Image (spheres, grey):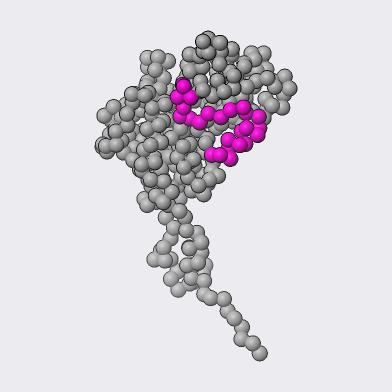
Amino acid sequence: MTAVQHPPLDTGERRRTGDARTLITSLIDPATVEAIAVDAWVALVGEEELLVPVPGDLPADTLSAWVDVVGPWTGSVVLTTGRQTAADLTRALLREAAPELLDHEDVADAFGEIANVVGGNVKAALPGPSTLGLPEVGPAPAVRHPEDVCRIDVLWRGQPLAVSVQGALPSLPTPHDNPHPNGASL
Amino acid sequence: MRALVIDDSRAMRRIVGAALEGLGYETRQAGHGREALDVLQEGWTPDLCTIDWNMPVMDGLQFVSAVRANPAWRRLTLMMVTSESEQGQIVRALAAGAHEYVIKPFTADALRDKLALLGMLPEEAVL
């Protein structure tokens, strides 16, 4: 008679290890994000338009534009600045074609396109294949996992602007989060 | 020469349109692939289409495929102008029938260089 071999107790550890996600901080660094943003500014906003890598306090009334990236790394590339700065950016993009009075659609279109260009080039620097969503504009998507964020803070024409590459998924549970420490199943 | 600028962003249509007009192109604009097909079907035939990839209603790749499926439009030069810069996507666009691929952000000079490679610079821009 042979002894029955029971599989080892499933503690969930192996599953957690297999599920480990790569954090954005190991895929891209702030210098790369800044270089991408600077290239986008020069091409879209103007050759004389500098992004100065100095952090500033964002005003209370901000607007964000972002694109989602879905692939081996899933998250959003989010640009956030004050509403007035977003309007100034729109005028800079549209130049002589800018209407006297900008409406929200004008700002959403221009700010969204900058997010699209920055996001597309961030996506290209990440492992692929990935898909890029259409630009969205509004309140910034929440940071789901504070460690899965690569953020730069810059000044444009003296006004603060943040570019955040942030994961869309929450933190994975750690062993301490296990609500059933004795392996009880539901 | 005529160019149809296809992009869902009005700001980007302005930027690309201004660059092409600066080279001597007469331009029209469309906000997505379906709208661009409508322009072609109404009989306004451009020499060049610049095409964004990610657009609502009909994306750039679908537009390229639709144009290439119609022999009446076989002389159109199709140039993707997009922030999609993964190698695999460039290959897909070229395989679908695009002639050239410009990655955003780009400068007016870079656009001019690509058009020169395609032999698509209007006479006034060559002189």
At 39% from the left and 40% from the top, the residue drawn is A33
Residue A107 position, x and y percent, is 40, 25
Q: Can you see residue A33?
A: yes
Q: Tell me how many marks there are.
A: 0
Q: Eyeballing the image, is A7 above or below A120?
A: below
At 66% from the left and 32% from the top, the residue drawn is B96
Residue A95 position, x and y percent, is 39, 17
Instruction: Identify which residue, B4 or A10, lies in the foreground.
Output: B4
Residue B106: within the magenta? yes
Q: Eyeballing the image, is B36 above or below A72?
A: above
Does residue B96 appear to the left or right of A160 in the view shown?
Answer: right
Residue that extends furthest to the front in the rendered view of this protein? B127
Does residue B110 appear to the left or right of A5 in the view shown?
Answer: left
Residue A157: within the magenta? no
Q: Eyeballing the image, is A119 above or below A20?
A: above
Does residue B56 appear to the left or right of A103 in the view shown?
Answer: right
Query: Quadrant where the N terminus of chain A lies?
Result: bottom right
Instruction: Identify which residue, A13 or A35, lies in the foreground.
Output: A35
Residue that extends furthest to the right in the rendered view of this protein? B71
Res A39 quadrant in image: top left
- Span of residues in magenta: B86-110
Q: Can you see residue A103?
A: no
At 36% from the left and 35% from the top, the residue drawn is A80
At 65% from the left and 20% from the top, the residue drawn is B76
Instruction: Identify which residue, B31 or A176, lies in the foreground.
Output: B31
Residue A165 position, x and y percent, is 41, 43
Residue B61 position, x and y percent, is 62, 32
